[in-house]
Image (cartoon, rainbow, N blue to C red):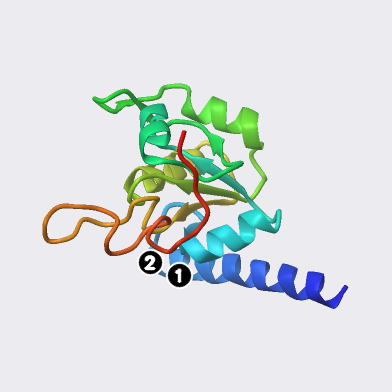
């Protein structure tokens, strides 16, 4: 019983911290959450994890098991998905704690902003994304990101 209470308190604190940083920075959505904190929230059932990458990225690069999928953009040209907000609402509702994940944190930040403007109240961006930032050789996966941190993922 005590462990569950401590877990809920830690989850609430992680989200409160993200909100405070976002408010101070003028971020147009609830905030950014580090990959480790996102996994802790998601795996404990305190948040929904939504992958906003393309279906091709999920298939060929990998994805987080049990994560939901609502693409922010589609195809190799990354054409904006005009149904994104409707699809997200259908899968999560507008009041759930939602963590958005993309390749590097950029598209998921755009998606979080759009969702917030559409009335979602607790949308967070997973910082660093699934693959992380580019290194000096323009490669991903060596600096940071979900996979670099050794968090659970699978590949089709």
Q: Position of residue 154 (x, y in %)?
A: 49, 43
Q: Nearer the viewer, residue 92 or 60?
A: 60
Q: What residue is drawn where x is 39% and y is 48%?
A: 109
Count of all numbered marks drawn on residues in the image: 2
Give the left or right position of residue 102, taking residue 8 as reference: left
Q: What residue is drawn where x is 79% and y is 75%?
A: 3
Task: Give the residue pinned by disc 2.
Answer: 25
- Alpha-carbon neighbours of circle 1 within 10 Å: few (<14), some, or many (≥20)? some
Task: Give the residue pinned by disc 1.
Answer: 21
Say which quadrant the N terminus sits in.
Answer: bottom right
How far separated are the C-alphas under marks 2 and 1?
Answer: 6 Å
Q: Position of residue 47 (x, y in %)?
A: 64, 52
Q: Position of residue 95 (x, y in %)?
A: 67, 44
Q: Secondary structure at mark 1?
A: helix
Q: Secondary structure at mark 2?
A: helix
Q: Position of residue 84 (x, y in %)?
A: 47, 28
Residue placed furthest toward the left: 137
In the rendered image of this protein, does residue 44 appear above or below residue 119?
below
Give the left or right position of residue 35, taking residue 57 as reference: right
Q: Nearer the viewer, residue 15 or 113?
A: 15
In the rendered image of this protein, does residue 95 appear above or below residue 13?
above
Give the left or right position of residue 142, taking residue 19 as reference: left
Q: What residue is drawn where x is 59% and y is 51%?
A: 122
Q: Nearer the viewer, residue 59 or 55?
A: 59
In the rendered image of this protein, does residue 147 appear above or below residue 81?
below
Residue placed furthest toward the right: 1
Q: Are marks 2 and 1 in contact (CB under 8 Å)?
A: yes
Q: What residue is drawn where x is 26% and y is 25%?
A: 76
Q: Which mark is residue 139?
A: none
- Alpha-carbon neighbours of circle 2 within 10 Å: few (<14), some, or many (≥20)? few
């Amino acid at each position: 019983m005590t462990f569950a209470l401590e877990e809920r308190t830690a989850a609430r604190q992680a989200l409160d911290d993200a909100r405070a940083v976002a408010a101070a920075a003028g971020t147009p959505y609830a905030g950014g959450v580090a990959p480790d904190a996102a996994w802790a929230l998601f795996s404990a059932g305190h948040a929904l994890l939504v992958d906003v990458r393309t279906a091709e990225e999920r298939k060929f690069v990998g994805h987080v098991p049990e994560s939901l999928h609502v693409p922010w953009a589609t195809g190799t040209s990354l054409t904006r998905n005009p149904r994104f907000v409707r699809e997200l609402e259908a899968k999560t509702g507008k009041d759930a704690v939602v963590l958005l994940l993309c390749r590097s944190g950029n598209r998921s930040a755009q998606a979080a902003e759009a969702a917030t403007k559409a009335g979602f109240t607790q949308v967070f961006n997973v910082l660093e994304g699934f693959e992380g930032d580019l290194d000096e050789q323009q490669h991903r996966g060596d600096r940071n990101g979900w996979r670099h941190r050794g968090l659970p993922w699978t590949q089709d």
